Amino acid sequence: MIETARTRRKNKDFEIDGQAYAFDSTTIDLCLNVFWWAKFRKNKGGVKLHTLYDVNTSIPSFIHITPALVHDVNAMDAIPYEKEAYYVFDRGYYDLKRLKKINDIGAFFVIRPKRTTHYIPVEIRDTKHNANGILSDDIVEFETQIASKRYGSKIRRVVYYSSELNKTFVYLTNNFEISAERVALLYKKRWEVELFFKWIKQHLKIKSFWESSENAVRIQIYSAIIAYCMVAIVEHDLQLNRSTYEVLRIFSASLLDKTYIRTLFFDEEIKVQDDRKLSLNFF
C-alpha cells in the first residue's frame, strides 16, 4: 500500500534532485495500568512511532514501532538506506558512527549538530554575495580525536539565517556538491514529518485504542497508515488537486455521506466560496 501510494503521488516538480526523506519519531502515550507491557516511566506507558517520511510524495515510506524506552538514535539502525538518497535528521539523531555508516553506503545526510561540537576549518567558501540567508559554507574536520575517529573524514558545515524565525541554524552534511541553499531547504522539509504526526494523531485516532495487547496496538497504528495511504491514492486517481490532509479532513467529516466523492469535493469548494462572499458582504 505504501509503495502504491508513493508511486501515484510522486511529484515531478520537486525542488530537490534525488529521493529525500525526513526521519523522526513521536511518542504515543498509553495508560500503564491497561498497557502494562509498554512501560516507559514510573507511572507512564507508551510506544514510539519511528517514521521515514518521503517528502517528495508526503507518504511515510517506512514505519518502525518500538517501546517508548528505545532511544531515537537506535532506530537509525533499522532504516533501509538507499544509495544517493538524502536523509534529514534533527539534533536528537546526532551520532557520528551512524552518520559514517550512511556516508559509507553512498547516501547523504543533513543534520543539526550538538552545540558543543567543535571544528577545524579546511576550506572556507565565499558567501559574501549570497542573499539567501547563507552566512557560511565551509569544509571542516572535527577538532576532538574521539569525533574524528568516529566519523573519520571531512564534513560540510552550513550556517543559515532564517529571517522569518529570526534564528540561525547550523547544518552538517556529507554532500559537497549541492548548493548551501539546497541544504537549508532539505532541512526545512523535515518539518513535514511533524505535520504528519500531528494529523495522524488527530484524524486517524491513534491516541485511544480498542484493545490493550501489543499486537492490537500495532494493528491499529498500521491500519491508520493504510487509511492515510488509501486517501492519498484516492486524491491522485480522482485528480482532486488537494493535499492528503485536506482530503482526510473532508472524508472524516463525511463518513456517513453517500454523496459521490467528486460531488462532495465540488460542494466543499462552493461552500468555501459562499463563506468568503458572506464575509465580504458582512464587512
Image: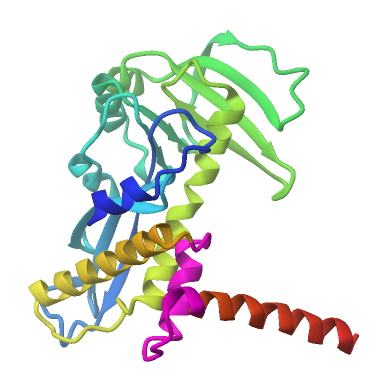
Q: Position of residue 245 (x, y in %)?
A: 47, 67
Q: Residue at x 49, y 20 (%)?
A: 156
Residue 41 left/right relative to 267 = left
Image color mode = rainbow
Residue 271 left/right relative to 217 = right
Q: Which residue ends up furthest to the top in the rendered image?
A: 123
Residue 281 higher or lower than 218, as above or below: below
| Residue 260 included in the magenta stretch of the image | yes
Q: Residue at x 33, y 79 (%)?
A: 205
Q: Position of residue 225 (x, y in %)?
A: 27, 65
Residue 145 higher or lower than 39, as above or below: above
Range of magenta residues:
240-263
Total residue callouts:
0
The image quadrant that residue 103 belongs to is top left
Of the 4 image quadrants, the one containing the C terminus is bottom right
Q: Nearer the viewer, residue 169 or 209?
A: 209
Q: Which residue ends up furthest to the right in the rendered image?
A: 283
Q: Residue at x 70, y 18 (%)?
A: 127
Residue 176 left/right relative to 130 = left
Q: Nearer the viewer, residue 18 or 1?
A: 1
